[in-house]
Structures are given as C-alpha cells and as structure tokens.
C-alpha cells in the first residue's frame, strides 16, 4: 500500500491534546506550551539503499544528510532548530563506522547550532547488511503562527528556491544546504504558506494544494533545472530540499527586489487557482500528473 493512502486511514484515528496546534500532515508538528514561542517537532529517517548507496557513502555524509533532512522541515515552517535525538540501528560490526557516523552528525550539528541531546543505538542481525537512522528535530518559531501548507489562497503566486532534478546522480542529495535562513526571512514578511520539497516538486505542490483546498497552475518550463536534469526529473525526482511557497501578488516585486540570498535562486513558477483541491495543471489546464511522474511515494509491502 502506498504511504499516502495508508496515512489517510491512520492519521484521523490519532487523538491530539489541546496543546497540539498543528498535528500530523505538515512539515512539523506545532505545540503550544504556553511560552512566547511555539515548539516545532519533526522526525525523519534515512534507510540504506533508499536514501543513499550503502557501499559508496561515508557514514559522516549519511549522518549529515539525516540532520539536514530534518532541518529542511524546520525551514519550511520559518523556524529555528535547537535540539535533536537520534535512533540508529545498523549491521556494521566495526566501531569506526559508528564513531565516524557520530562525528559527522556532530560536525553538522555544530554548523547549525543544534544539540544532539539524546537517542538510542542498537545493532541489527547480519542477514541483510544496512542501516536505519531516525532523527527527531525540535525547534521554535516566534509566538505567531508558523508558515503552513494549508494557508495558500487563490490568486497568490507560487515561488521556489534553488534548482530541481537530478539530485541523486549529481550528489546534491548529500551536499545540499537546508534553507533555514531563507525560510525565516520568508515567513517573517512574505508568506504564510510553505512546504519542503523532498519527495518531488509535483507531488509536494499537490500536497500543499490539498492542505489549502486549492488548485495549482505550475509552469514547468520556468523551474530552474540542475545540470543534466530533464523536465521529468525536475517534476518527479525528489531529494531537492528546496522551499515551495506562495506570495501575494502585491508583495511579489518587493520580495524579488529585497531577496538577500544572492547564492540561492528565487523563481516564480506558477500561481494558486480555484480548482479541485490538489490538482496541479499547466497553463493550458492539463493535469501535470498526466505528463510527468508524480514523485516518490513510500510503499509498505
């Protein structure tokens, strides 16, 4: 069963305390603990030969990717990350692999001022070599509502940071930089709606549209491509870790003029429209899912 279909059955059955401002379904959970800020919480994982090549990827790079994947979720809410907890299970039987993994994790954590403050470590049976590492990230956002997937309004313009496609073979999936600075800048002034693009531009645009109960008109020809990427890869590859967000038309020119991150592309790639929730179409109104692969769906066997 596909992940999305399975979660539709599971998530409505999960009760939420009054302190849960935003539960499952966005990039982070949002918790109100009565302070002058809101707590952000997310969890993500990396699995050998799914998120990286087991035989060709150094443990330091695996650990760094795991943390950065989670930081990208915090970025999509306009927040700041502070704490993380790691659960690591592996078939490796040499201490150096583990020490290298934790060294890579700590090096990346120092870069983003995140404390690795707990977790769990266990071994796996040797029958199938591999690793599963899961990291929980905790952060904060000022005491206003964070950027959410569900706030898009018809008529708003759709923007994206960075380039798309060919992430795995280019090495971008390991060497990306989470858009924390960019996310905070955008959420403070220009947007109430953001999503982290990790499973494919088309799929994640559809998730934003479903959450906001709107349609999306996307202009594939306008999306910046990573070197060597075809449009099919731009739409469906995933592992981009860029931000997709909406901006009111009267703020667009000001955003483009004031964008302070010269090393990061900022591109208008579409607009929000009235339409069936979740449908992403081109300028001619044709659903893009009929043209391009929809992106990465985890499959439960």
Image (cartoon, rainbow, N blue to C red):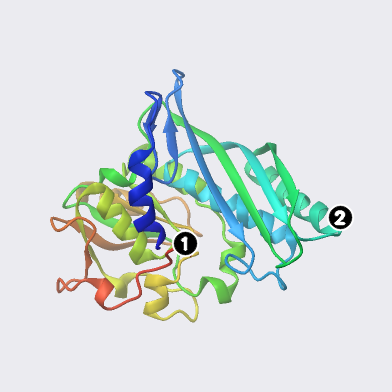
Q: Residue at x 18, y 71 (%)?
A: 283
Can you tell which mark lies on residue 95? 2
Left or right of 295 on screen, residue 113: right
**In the depicted structure, whether residue 32 falls above or below residue 153:** above
Q: Earlier in the sequence, mark 1 or mark 2?
A: 2
Could you say where residue 255 lies in the image, as x and y percent from the top left? 33, 50
Mark 1, mark 2: which one is toward the viewer? 1
Q: Residue at x 76, y 49 (%)?
A: 102
- Answer with the quarter of the image where residue 38 lies: top left
Left or right of 56 on screen, residue 226: left
How far apart are the alpha carbons under marks 1 and 2? 32 Å
* Residue 224 visible in this rendered orientation of the protein: no
Mark 1 crowdedness (10 Å alpha carbons): few <14, some 14-19, many ≥20: few
Left or right of 183 on screen, residue 96: right
Could you say where residue 206 lies in the image, as x and y percent from the top left? 29, 59
Could you say where residue 119 lies in the image, as x and y percent from the top left? 68, 39
Quadrant containing the N terminus is bottom left
Q: Residue at x 32, y 47 (%)?
A: 149
* Residue denoted by label 1: 300
Can you tell which mark lies on residue 179? none
* Residue 218 visible in this rendered orientation of the protein: yes
**In the depicted structure, whether residue 95 falls above or below residue 24:** below
Q: Secondary structure at mark 1?
A: loop
**In the depicted structure, whether residue 280 falls above or below residue 7:** below
Q: Residue furthest top?
A: 34
Q: Residue at x 50, y 75 (%)?
A: 166
- Answer with the quarter of the image where residue 281 lies: bottom left
- Badges 1 and 2: C-beta atoms under 8 Å apart? no
Q: Residue furthest right?
A: 95
């Amino acid at each position: 069963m596909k992940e999305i279909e399975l979660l539709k059955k599971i998530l409505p059955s999960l009760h939420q305390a009054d302190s849960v401002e935003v539960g499952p379904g966005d990039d982070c959970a949002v918790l109100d603990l009565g302070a002058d800020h809101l707590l952000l919480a997310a969890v993500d994982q990396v699995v050998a030969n799914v998120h990286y090549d087991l035989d060709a990827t150094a443990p330091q790079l695996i650990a760094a990717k795991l943390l950065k994947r989670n930081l990208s979720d915090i970025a999509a809410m306009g927040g700041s990350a502070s704490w993380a907890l790691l659960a690591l299970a592996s078939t490796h039987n040499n201490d150096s692999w583990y020490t290298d993994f934790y060294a890579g994790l700590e090096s990346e954590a120092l870069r983003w001022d995140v404390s690795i403050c707990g977790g769990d470590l266990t071994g796996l049976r040797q029958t199938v070599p591999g690793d599963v590492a899961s990291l929980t990230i905790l952060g904060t956002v000022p005491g206003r509502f964070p950027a959410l997937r569900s706030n898009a309004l018809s008529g708003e313009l759709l923007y994206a940071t960075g380039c798309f496609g060919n992430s795995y073979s280019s090495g971008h999936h390991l060497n990306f930089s989470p858009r924390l600075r960019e996310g905070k800048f955008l959420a403070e002034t220009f947007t109430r709606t953001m999503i982290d693009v990790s499973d494919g531009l088309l799929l994640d645009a559809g998730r934003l549209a479903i959450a906001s109960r709107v349609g999306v008109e996307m202009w594939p020809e306008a999306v910046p491509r990573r070197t060597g990427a075809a449009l099919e890869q731009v739409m469906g590859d995933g592992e981009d870790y860029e931000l997709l967000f909406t901006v009111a038309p009267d703020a667009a020119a000001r955003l483009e003029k004031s964008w302070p991150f010269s090393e990061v592309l900022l591109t208008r790639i579409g607009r929000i429209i009235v339409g069936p929730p979740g449908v992403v179409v081109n300028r001619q109104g044709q659903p893009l899912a009929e043209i391009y692969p929809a992106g990465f769906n985890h499959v439960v066997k």
